Image: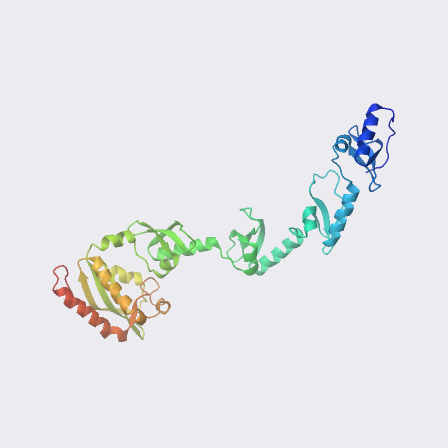
Amino acid sequence: MSNETTKIDPNCSITKRHIREAKAVGLTLLGSGKDRKYRTYHINKCEHIQQFQVGHVKENNFRCSRCLDMKLSKEAKAQNLSLLTTPPGSKLKSQRLYRFNECEHEQVISPANVRKGKDFKCNECFEIKLNKEAKDAGLRLIGKANNKNANYRQYEILKCLHRQDITTSNARTGGYYCSQCQVIKHAKEASAGGLTLVEEGKDSNYRVFSFNECGHIQEIHLSAVRDGNFVCNTCEETSRDLPSEVYMLKIVVGSFSYLKLGYTNNLIYRIKRYKLPESASLSRVKILKFKKGRDAHQFESFLHIKYKANVIDQVAMQRFHPGSGSTECYPLDMLDTLMDELELKETQLKSSSDHRIVQ
């Protein structure tokens, strides 16, 4: 700011008042200012000359801009920054223009944050870093996230070209997945199991599906859909009042043979859902028919709980049962044990008028 002033009449009553007001707050009135609202003053404490509004002087609402710049420059130097001149006409009030000495990038930062030494970084360097991390993780950085969260950016996943918001930390570590591809995957798994994907579920592990055969809507765990380990609860509850059967099958796939124990009200449909290899051969070892599905389910559950330790590992069986039925499969050496259980139940049921047994 220029220190040139225009002389003022010291005998003017208004000037005399301005002189008194200046003296009261440690200033000396020197002359006029850039317009009628301003005057030029000598700041007695620091010896600097500066223009202030007369009203601000009266209210003691002013500060030496040169002293402030010196203070801010010192604080900037402590953070390896350089304070730059604020551009003319700038609307900045609580922020200043700084240069990062290490990278020489310029940026507007709050002096309070510089003073504290936190909550600021070089945005240009940060964007360069994000772009490199994105490339290393198979992504392309697009820009700001749609959700406006500072921890997110929008990326394009190079493998599928889908775009989505991802946290910068997940982009850095590769801890992300394509949500659009995930939906496609879940929809395919649903279709393979006779379902249609409807919407999100109660959490990330669940989705709402529609059963293609009966039209009922149900929330199911994604892993259960993937493994085919699910039933329509509405139909199942109804079926438990209808005739059902406990069955034991012998299945042979190549050189591997095993037993499958279960219950159903439609064995043919249940076997189709297994999606066994075309080379698989199947024989019915024993079938017990019940008039009440809940009795069949109760007996089947009793056997599985009792012989849980003898079940073949589910993961190992999924290659033979990609659709469903990979659980509750038994090795052939369990044949006599399971047959004894079924025949014992058969003996118990022969005396009951509520059930009919068929071998």
Q: Residue at x 79, y 44 (%)?
A: 67
Q: Is residue 114 above or below residue 248?
A: above
**Residue 143 in view in this figure:** yes
- Quadrant where the image shows the C terminus: bottom left
Left or right of 144 on screen, residue 342: left
**Residue 359 in view in this figure:** no
Give whichever of 60, 271 is nearer the camera.
Answer: 60
Residue 182 in picture, x, y percent from top left:
45, 55
Residue 59 in picture, x, y percent from top left:
74, 32
Query: What is the tally of numbered marks visible in this picture?
Result: 0
Q: Quadrant of residue 9?
A: top right
- Quadrant where the image shows the N terminus: top right
Residue 269 in picture, x, y percent from top left:
26, 59
Q: Quadrant of residue 206?
A: bottom left
Give whichever of 338, 130 is nearer the camera.
Answer: 338
Left or right of 354 on screen, residue 240: right
Q: Name the colouring of the figure.
A: rainbow
| Outermost residue, front side | 24
Residue 190 in picture, x, y percent from top left:
37, 55
Q: Residue at x 18, y 69 (%)?
A: 344
Q: Residue at x 26, y 54 (%)?
A: 236
Give whichever of 238, 65 is nearer the camera.
Answer: 65
